[in-house]
Amino acid sequence: MCRRAWISILLPATLLAAPVGVGAQTMEEVLNGLFLFSSGGDPLFLAGSAGVAATAAHGDHFIPAETESNGALLGVFTSAISGNIANFPLSSTVSSETFRFVGGVPTPTSNSFGPIFSERAQTLGRGRFDVGFSYSSIRFNELRGTSMDDLQLNFVHQNTDFPNCGTIFGGDCSLSGFPLWEHDVIELGLDLRIDAEIYAFNATFGVLDWLDIGIAVPVVSLAIDGASRARIIPSQVDEPAHFFGGTQASPTLEATTTTSGSTSGIGDVAARTKVRFLDGEVTDLAMLGEVRLPTGRVEDFLGAGEASVRGLFIGSATLGDFSPHVNFGYVHRRGDLQSSSVQLAAGFDQRLSDWSTFVIDLLGDFKTENSLSFPGPLTFDPPIVRTVERANIPNVRDDTLDAAIGMKVQTSGGVVLWGNALVSLNEGGMRSDVIATFGVQYSSR
């Protein structure tokens, strides 16, 4: 591949890898901006209540630091974004023809150019290398099946029990819903747009005929734009304790805000090793080990913040021009808001001609536990019993099931160009309906 071509590929992503400038907002701060309705305050801080002597103590009764359930609502958003970026599938370790050396002569072990996001068991062969670059464009448009432009959240009041509270207000302040102002709720509607571009560089080297080592380095560009509309539903209409602005006599109970920001940088780098332990005339078997290092900035949602380890069993076959493959593995992820998972992939690549291959895969990631859960409905204690739903987003499993459909073509110079559409087949997690990925790959001969 010519030097100028590689420079044209590497230069844009190298520039993207530069961190945000000093003093710039992090993406976590940009997201929190959707819940800021006063300057200099915490999310959900009520400057109106805090600015009036009679209600000054009520200004911070909804902020996440004071209300555990509110913090959980915000935590799901931050973890869903970073988890999707950190765990985005990287391209196959071997993306072109494979060979073994017989009597010093390279002999093909595959007739096609292989899968795109899954793995086949063949290895490159001693002394050969494979390098590539891919570009993916993502627009997240649903969170657990709920449109990102119509998210509804309800933030509840903290329990304000304190010494002598019962004496002052004449009741049991340990109960949720007493004093009466604890029934106040902030209803918030979100219109959120999250776009990501992932530039991934990968390289694989054949140490032995049966052993490959490789690395994949993603560079991520992330942009967040959003608007929020908040409304306080007061329990005391005449003299409300909570308001965004104004006074108790003339309170402002509604507020809107917008936020936007972007960042770029290196994501979580993956180091890989593949060992082929069966080299048959038709069937090959191998194991892949992968470690994703926490190199992406957590505060910008570019990484998971914890290392993950994946072990993958790979089986593939060569039946003329038809090459089916199956993958089964386990990913161990650490962290309170990252769940380990079982991964499955099954599909085939079909050689259409000497220079083209059609690829289709079914990719599944099934969580061992659902770590991202919205708080359940809050039911207030007697004497006023009622239930408040926290969100219009269901508490369902974040398993993902996708179809990957792609095509690979080889140029006269030996470079393989490929394109793929990753189509969402279920509603788990934060999803994009379709993710387009384009790549270029070159293998030594």
Image: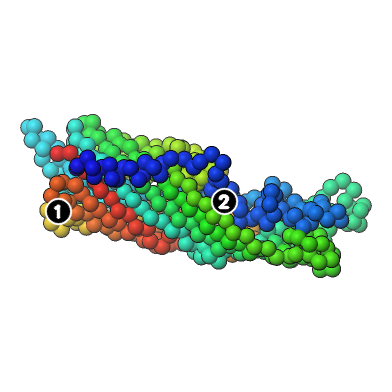
Q: Nearer the viewer, residue 27 or 183?
A: 27
Residue depicted at 34% across the width and 51% down the height: 135
Task: Identify the element where label 1 is drawn.
Answer: loop
Residue 146: x, y in percent?
52, 64
Residue 426: x, y in percent?
43, 62
Q: Within the image, what quadrant is residue 291 found in?
A: top left
Asked whether the viewer can see residue 376, the reply is yes
Q: Is 294 rendered above or below residue 316?
A: above
Residue depicted at 52% across the width and 62% down the height: 148
Asked whether the viewer can see residue 177, the reply is no
Residue 128 horizontal side relative to residue 388, left or right:
left
In what quadrant of the picture does the C terminus appear?
top left
Q: Nearer the viewer, residue 350 or 235?
A: 235
Task: Identify the element where label 2 is drawn.
Answer: helix
Neighbor class of circle 2 (other Cα within 10 Å; few <14, some 14-19, many 20+) is: many
Residue 300 horizontal side relative to residue 110, left or right:
right
Q: Nearer the viewer, residue 195 or 373?
A: 195
Q: Is 58 rendered above or below residue 281?
A: below
The residue type indicated by label 1 comes to Trp
In what quadrant of the picture does the N terminus appear?
top left
Residue depicted at 37% across the width and 41% down the height: 14
Q: Where does label 2 land, which residue?
A: 30
Residue 119 horizontal side relative to residue 143, left or right:
left
- Residue 355 — which label? 1
Residue 216: x, y in percent?
34, 40
Residue 260: x, y in percent?
54, 55
